[in-house]
Amino acid sequence: MDQHVAFAKGTLEQFIRQVEYLKINGFPGLCSDLAEISGASETLAVWHRTESENGEATFNGKPSDELLVTMPFAGTSFTVRLLFYLQEPWMPPDISFSDIHFLSRLSAQDLTEQVPSLNTWNSLEDDIIAQLLHQLLQLYKRYQLEKLETDDVMQFVYESLLKTLSIGEGDIEVSVGNQGSQYSSLLVRLPLSLQDVPPVLVDANTGPATSLLHVTFQGTEGVFIPKLHLSPRIESLIGGASTLALPAVPPGACLMDYVERILQLLEQRVRKAVLSFEMRKQFVAQKPHKLSSTAIILLRLNTEENTGPECQGSATTSIRTLTSGEAKKPKHHGTFSLFFQSKEILCQFGCAVLEYDAERFCKVVLLFEVKDFHFLTFITLSPLFPQQQAPKVVLQSLYHNSPREPYSMELTDLSYNSQWNAEEMVRHIKQGIQQNVSSFQTASIKTAL
C-alpha cells in the first residue's frame, strides 16, 4: 500500500467516524431523533469492496463525498448539503441549503462570524461535523427570528409562550412563511417533569424524555392546528400521542390557554401512571416477612370454613414449604388467618407465590393445591389499574392440556370496585378462586378426555 493510498484510506475512515459520532450522539434541534442523513457510507463500501476483490488496496473512491443532512425544524425540514474534498481533509466543506431564501440572504461574512468551526476546521476531531451542523442550525434559527418581526401574530404568540411556560428560546422553534405563503408553524418543548416518576417506569428507554407540540397557523387570524409528538421514553410511561385524545380547538381559541390545557393533560397522565405503579406495588409486594426466592411453595386450600374464631372465614388448613426436594415446616404455619394482618397479596398469599414482577409489579404467579389438585393462578395488573381496569385472573391446570397448551380459564365474574383498597381487592380474588376451583377442575378433566 503506497503512501497516497494510505493517506486516502485514513481520511475516509476519519470521515466515517465523524458521521458515526453524529448518529450516536444525536443531531441538533428539538426533533433530533427524526433527522436523516445520507451519502456518508457509499464511498467506504466502494473502498472495502475494491480492496477485497483485487487482493490489494487501490483508491477508487470519488475525489469528493457529499453528505445530506435533513433536520426537522418547527414542523418543517431544513436540509444541509456538505461537500467534502477527501483528498484535502484540512479544508472545510462547501455548504448549500434547501431553503433558497435563507441561502440568498447569507454572506461570507455571516458564515465567518457565526459559524466559527469553519475558521478552525480540524478534520481529526470526531465531533467536527456535529459542531458545524449545530452552528448552522443556530444561524437558521436566528434568520427565522428576524422574519418573526414582520409577523405581528406570530411574534405575539412566540413571546407569550416564552412567558407563560417559563421556557427559554432553545425550547421553541418557529418557521415564518415566506412572502405569499399563508402558513407558519412553531414547535414548542413542553416543560413536562418526570422528577417524581420511579426510574423503573422509564429506564427501559434511554432517549430523552421529550413532549413536543407542533402548531401550524393558517392565515393571519391566529387559527391553528395542533399535533403532539412524544418521545419513546414518554410513551412508555403514559402511552402514545394517539391515545391522548387532544381536546378540540374551539373557534377563537387562545393558543396559550390551549397549550396550558395540553400540559395539564400530560401532567395528569403522568400522575395516574405513578399512582398505578404505587397501587400495583402495594397490591403485590409490600410484605412483613421475606420469602426465599429459591423455594417452591405450596398453599393447600380448603373450601370449607374453619371453625376456630381465629380462622373464621379462612380458606387454609395447612401450608407446606418444599426446598431442594425436602419438606420443611415454615416458621409461620397453620391457618390462613396468619396472613390477614396486612392488605397486600404477598401477605395474604405469601406461601403460594411462585414468582412476581419485582420491578413494575404487573404480574403474580401463585401455586395452589385443592384436594390433591394442583393449579397455577396468574394475576395480571395493567397500567390502567386500579381506576380503569380490574386485575386479570387466570387459572391454569398443571395436569391437563387443551390442543396446544395447558388448560386455563379466566375468571371474568369477579367482583371489583376501583375504590376498594388492596386488602379488599385481594379478598375478592381469593373468594373468586374458591368459588371457581371446583368447576375449573371438572372442566380441565373433561378437556383431557
Image: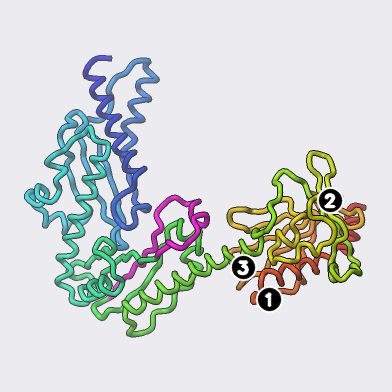
Rendered position, 386 above or below 231: below
Instruction: Say which quarter of the image contains residue 183.
Output: bottom left
Task: Give the residue pinned by disc 3.
Answer: 385
Compare marks 3 and 1 and give the one earlier in the sequence. 3
Please identify, in this view, whether the residue under mark 2 or under mark 1 is nearer the observer.
Answer: 2
What range of the chain is rendered magenta?
A: 193-218
Tell me: 436 left or right of 283. Answer: right
Q: Residue at coordinates 79% horizontally, 39% vertically from top-left?
A: 324
Tag 2: residue type?
Arg
Tell me: 94 left or right of 206. Answer: left
Q: Is residue 431 magenta?
A: no
Q: Is residue 213 magenta?
A: yes
Tag 1: residue type?
Asn
Tell me: 24 left or right of 447. Answer: left
Distance between the alpha carbons at the discs numbered 3 and 1: 11 Å
Q: Which mark is residue 320?
A: 2
Distance between the alpha carbons at the discs numbered 3 and 2: 32 Å
User: Residue 355, percent across and down?
Assistant: 70, 51
Snapshot colouring: rainbow
Task: Give the residue pinned by disc 1.
Answer: 417
Instruction: Say which quarter of the image contains residue 38.
Output: top left
Disc 3 residue crowd, few under 14, some 14–19, many 20+, Cα 10 Å: many
Please identify, in this view, whether the residue under mark 3 or under mark 2 is nearer the observer.
Answer: 2
User: Residue 70, percent across and down?
Assistant: 30, 51
Disc 2 residue crowd, few under 14, some 14–19, many 20+, Cα 10 Å: some
Q: Secondary structure at mark 1?
A: loop
Instruction: Say which quarter of the image contains residue 377.
Output: bottom right
Tag 3: residue type?
Phe
Return the residue nearer the eye: 399 or 247: 399
User: Residue 68, percent across and down?
Assistant: 28, 45
Q: Is residue 380 visible?
A: yes
User: Residue 401, percent across and down?
Assistant: 84, 50
